[in-house]
Image (spheres, rainbow, N blue to C red):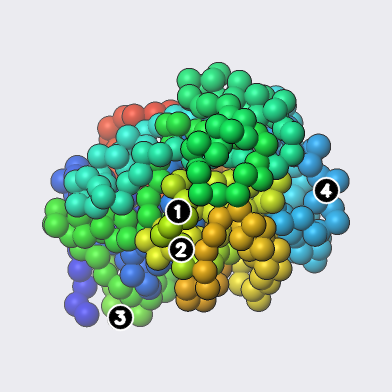
Amino acid sequence: MSERNADVVVLGAGIVGVSTAYAARQRGMSVVLIDRREPGSETSYGNAGIISSGSVSPLNNPSLWKSLPKYLGNRHAALRWNPLWAVRNAGWVARFLANSATSRFEPRATALHGLIGASARLHREWIVKAGVGHRLRETGWLRAWRSDAVASAKQEQAMLADYGIASELLDRQAISALEPDIVPVYKVGLLHTETASVDSPGAVVKAYARMLEGAGGEVRRAEIKAITPDGNRWRVVLASGEISARHVVVALGPWSADILRPLGYRVPLAFERGYHREFKPNPARSLRRPVYDIDGGFIMTPMEQGIRVTSGVELTDRDAPSSFAQLDQVVPLARGVAEFGDAVGEAWRGSRPTLPDSLPMIGPAPRHAGLWLAFGNQHIGFTTGPATGAAIAAMISGAPSSYDVAPFAPGRYI
């Protein structure tokens, strides 16, 4: 392959990378998007497909301390953790827990609210422009409790209201009216009415990538070996050649720290590993929207191929062998709520990149001009991808972002 020149090379073709590349192309820059796999094939594929208006509360929020005792036994479906990983990463764990202090909640929630709102607007614009508007469902998503958790639901509703996010408190009868084909096991529900979802997040990311190509951007499948400074430019070394670029954006999700290490950056990145499996639906007893079973620790959501059941968080090394214990624990619980048939395909596993404050890195690398970082979007990457990319494109072109990007500055950690 002969050397190619570009204004911007984006590394990683998940939702963040595709969004960055498209936003940069919209601003008139020549763009090459590179990944070893097809767009939307990794973490951006294996999620619940939710564009969540209400995910402003990080996982390490003040209520985490109350929940820790039930997680220490390492048997809860919502969270499993590898003790050896925890020992090796004690510093990260300590910083993660420190961020759950009450004083650190509001600034992070405010930052996420700005990012999420900007992303939701772009998703609704782009999904129509990309020709896949039929995949979008404006049905909200339901957070449901099997226990009598009215106080918890009201507390969450009040927190959402503080950020202007609408929701509806539901009793058992109202839940049955909303989802008439599920077994009435839930006593309390909170419907996030402004949340949307899609029936195939991977297909949506692929459609955005096609939209990029239609706008004149290039999508290239190649193994990325290294990035090196080259005067006032960057050299992107691939298995099949090199590309010279004015700007390089690292949007490699859980692999981002690897490509940055040779440049002297030590990124405190951990991995919220998650699993899902899809099952043949029963058309006569359908699921109408994503449902988060809070006591059970899983989400079930209708997808193009069937009912997708997702597990909770597994904290361990990114490339550790798969453990399907959480998935095996929750699938019978899901079958007790929704009616579905045999599994479709194999179980899936992915790694969601997470920083200690549960905020992504969005902005310039502190010691290298022309190097931009866009990763760490934890479990809301599909929701927040478009505005992450749009902010990077704006900063590259010297324009202001549509929301406050200061809380996401990479320099807070590296």
Label 2 residue SS:
strand
Q: CA distance from mark 1 to mark 4?
A: 33 Å
Residue in the picture at 42% in, 70% down: 226
User: Could you tell me the amino acid type at mark 2?
Assistant: Pro
Label 3 residue SS:
loop
Q: Quadrant of residue 195?
A: top left
- x then y, percent, for residue 119: 37, 38
Q: Quadrant of residue 158?
A: top right
- x then y, percent, for residue 34: 32, 66
Of mark 3 and mark 4, the one earlier in the sequence is 4
Q: Are marks 1 and 2 in contact (CB under 8 Å)?
A: yes
Residue in the picture at 37% in, 72% down: 37
**Tag in front: 1 or 3:** 1
Answer above or below: position of 277 versus 158: below
User: Could you tell me the amino acid type at mark 1?
Assistant: Ser
Question: What quarter of the picture does the N terminus occupy?
Answer: bottom left
Q: Which residue position is annotated with label 4? A: 70
Label 1 residue SS:
loop
Image side of residue 282 versus residue 275, left or right: left
Looking at the image, which residue sits at the far front? 284
**Tag in front: 3 or 2:** 2
Q: Which mark is residue 281?
A: 2
User: Could you tell me the amino acid type at mark 3?
Assistant: Ser
Of mark 1 and mark 3, the one earlier in the sequence is 3
User: Could you tell me the amino acid type at mark 4?
Assistant: Lys
Local crowd size for mark 2, using a 10 Å CA cut-off: few (<14), some (14–19), many (≥20): many
Q: Which mark is residue 286?
A: 1
Label 4 residue SS:
helix
Of mark 1 and mark 2, the one earlier in the sequence is 2
